[in-house]
Amino acid sequence: MTLGRIFVVLDHPQDLVNIAHVVRAMKNFGVRDLRLVAPREYDADRIAGIAHNTADVLARVRVCGALDEAIGGCVHVVGLTARGRTAKRNLQRPREAAAEILGRAEAGPVALLFGREDKGLPNEALDRCHRVVTIPSSPEYPSLNLGHAVMLMLYELALVRGAEGQPFKAPRRQAGPATGDDIERLAADVERALRAVDFFKTRSAERVMRTVREIIHRAPLDEREVKLLRAMVIEVVKYGERLARSRLHVDR
């Protein structure tokens, strides 16, 4: 429920493509509500063509005539800006802000407020913010793309919500670890393939194969991977045999 109380507000966005990127970022991180304050243009169909499979987010977009309409009723408003301000503000970095945002959302709606692409948030808008967040970046070029800024803030929220602990998707076909016998069969096949191409002509077979085993053990490999590698090196040997039977001359 907490995430459902967090919404993104774009104040006077200028570029429809940037709005689409924001919609895509919201879809990625499970935030569903977007409010646009006096956008220069807004076309849901065009945005859907850029940000695919985001119909649920687009269905909830609310276009507002003024900032007060967009953030009215919020218990916490966080403004993001790249520019330093001379006025004293309650400043935060994204990670610190994310933890507070989730906490505040337990009590009511929270707005993440982003300014227009060319000018950012005016001081009048920042006056309405409980916190002002600046994403650390190069001082020579501090301005982030609007979609990137939204993505980074939503990512920090995801981390606080425990996204780092989510398991990776399991492979389609699981395989057990390779046994010692599997490794020895692979090593034997590798050695036969190397002999087939005269790899040991100027090298010590014993030393090379010891290094090959070290590489194999370092992986470590599972059963399917060992079978695939064995099939590859066995095919090298078979190719050499077919070539020999054809009596074609091959320079080495």
Image: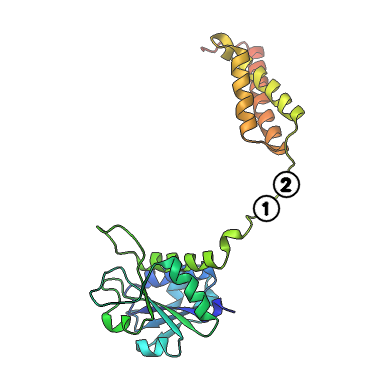
Q: CA distance from mark 1 to mark 2?
A: 8 Å
Residue 76 visible in the snapshot: yes
Give the numbered dot on residue 147. Answer: none
Give the numbered dot on residue 170. Answer: 1
In which quadrant is the N terminus drawn? bottom right
Residue shown at 53% from the left, 67% from the top: 160
Out of 208 and 77, give the one closest to the viewer: 77
Residue shown at 26% from the left, 71% from the top: 118
Residue shown at 64% from the left, 55% from the top: 169
Position of residue 145 relative to residue 198, above or below, is: below
Residue 32 visible in the snapshot: no
Residue 233: % across, % down: 65, 25
Residue position for label 2: 174
Amino acid type of the residue that numbered disc 2 sits on in the rendered structure? Gln
Position of residue 220 relative to residue 170, above or below, is: above
Residue 247: % across, % down: 62, 10
| Mark 2 neighbour class, 10 Å CA radius: few under 14, some 14 to 19, many 20 or more | few
**Is residue 226 shown left or right of residue 153?**
right
Residue 217: % across, % down: 65, 31
**Is residue 29 shown left or right of residue 77?**
right
Out of 247 and 19, give the one closest to the viewer: 19
Position of residue 252 relative to residue 24, above or below, is: above
Q: Are marks 1 and 2 in contact (CB under 8 Å)?
A: yes
Amino acid type of the residue that numbered disc 1 sits on in the rendered structure? Ala
What is the basis of the colouring in this image?
Answer: rainbow
Q: Secondary structure at mark 1?
A: loop
